[in-house]
């Protein structure tokens, strides 16, 4: 049993892809989910579908998050973006924006959520990292940097939260079948000067033992387990779901 009935969760980037799959997974376990996304229509539609709440928010407006107080039992830091370019061509403003969204925003949300979790003696922080939180690839300097930083944030949260019943973990998928990856395929094709199918076979899945994209629902199933009472002793960990990529 998940032990999650009656709990509340916040899922960022929740209107589509991995975030939407996580929102549905948690809702199925009896959790009231707040779907946070800048896509107001998408967040509202999903919230209505799962009986949750929509929060239309631009997370890059970090000033608005600094005094935020959250009363959620589960926080899923999922929002992210990708940009593919060599370091020499990578725009500094894009680098800063990506680190803001994928490092500073999770920090601010964790900071806002911990007081309630501490008071309740229960909390689950689940950070959607990536195999790129553990490995590096060319042309993804901001994404790789941000995900490595997120790993550190998650571990510090685990150490501070442990005495209060709060766990913090990272989920590290390989390439997931989402619109974000679809855009990456097109960007990589342009960067490498090859066809999109070649990108999938020779770039994205080159290091994977299983030559298939991860499905969002597979990621969500792991998130659901990490949120459950069964994962009480799991904290400070990074769970790969990468088809064997990181086994090399």
Image (cartoon, rainbow, N blue to C red):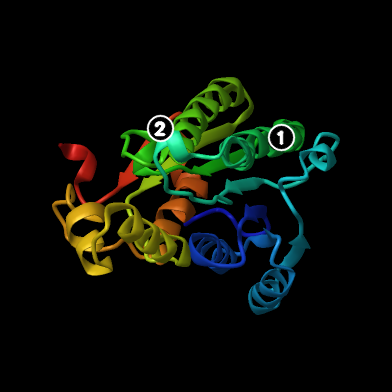
Q: Quadrant of residue 68?
A: top right
Q: What residue do we see at 75% from left, 66% from top?
A: 53
For marks 2 and 1, the one nearer the N-term is 1
Q: What residue sits right under mark 2 in the picture? A: 237
**Label at residue 50:** none
Q: Is residue 128 left or right of residue 120?
A: left
Quick one: label 1, few (<14), some, or many (20+) residues within 10 Å?
A: some
Which numbered mark, 2 or 1, is in the foreground of this view?
1
Along the line of sight, which residue is nearer the eye, 62 or 233? 62
Q: What residue sits right under mark 1 in the picture? A: 108
Q: Split into 4 quadrants, where in the image is the C terminus?
A: top left
Quick one: label 2, few (<14), some, or many (20+) residues within 10 Å?
A: some
Rendering coords of residue 148 (x, y %)? 44, 30
* Measured Cα–Cα span from mark 2 to mark 1: 21 Å
Q: Quadrant of residue 61?
A: top right
Rendering coords of residue 50 (x, y %)? 64, 74
Rendering coords of residue 33 (x, y %)? 67, 61
Give the secondary structure at mark 2: loop
Q: Is residue 3 above or below residue 46?
A: above
Rendering coords of residue 54 (x, y %)? 75, 66
Q: Is residue 193 visible?
A: yes
Q: Is residue 198 left or right of residue 161?
A: left
Q: What residue do we see at 31% from left, 39% from top?
A: 137
């Amino acid at each position: 049993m998940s032990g999650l009935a009656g709990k509340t969760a916040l899922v960022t980037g929740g209107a589509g892809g991995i975030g939407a799959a996580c929102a549905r997974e948690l809702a199925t376990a009896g959790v009231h989910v707040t779907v946070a996304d800048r896509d107001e229509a998408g967040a509202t539609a999903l919230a209505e579908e799962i009986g949750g709440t929509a929060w239309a928010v631009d997370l890059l407006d970090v000033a608005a998050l600094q005094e935020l107080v959250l009363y959620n039992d589960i926080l899923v830091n999922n929002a992210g973006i990708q940009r593919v370019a060599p370091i020499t061509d990578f725009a500094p403003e894009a680098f800063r924006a990506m680190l803001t969204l994928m490092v500073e925003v999770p920090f601010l949300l964790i900071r806002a959520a911990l007081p309630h979790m501490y008071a309740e003696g229960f909390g689950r922080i689940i950070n959607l990292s990536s195999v790129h939180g553990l490995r590096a690839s060319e042309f993804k300097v901001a994404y790789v940097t941000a995900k490595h930083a997120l790993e550190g944030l998650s571990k510090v949260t685990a150490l501070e939260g442990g005495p209060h019943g709060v766990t913090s973990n990272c989920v590290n998928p390989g390439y997931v079948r989402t619109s974000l990856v679809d855009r990456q395929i097109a960007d990589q094709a342009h960067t490498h000067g090859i066809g999109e199918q070649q990108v999938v076979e020779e770039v994205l899945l080159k290091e994977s033992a299983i030559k298939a994209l991860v499905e969002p629902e597979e990621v969500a199933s792991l998130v659901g387990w990490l949120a459950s009472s069964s994962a009480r002793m799991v904290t400070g960990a990074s769970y790969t779901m990468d088809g064997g990529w990181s086994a090399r």
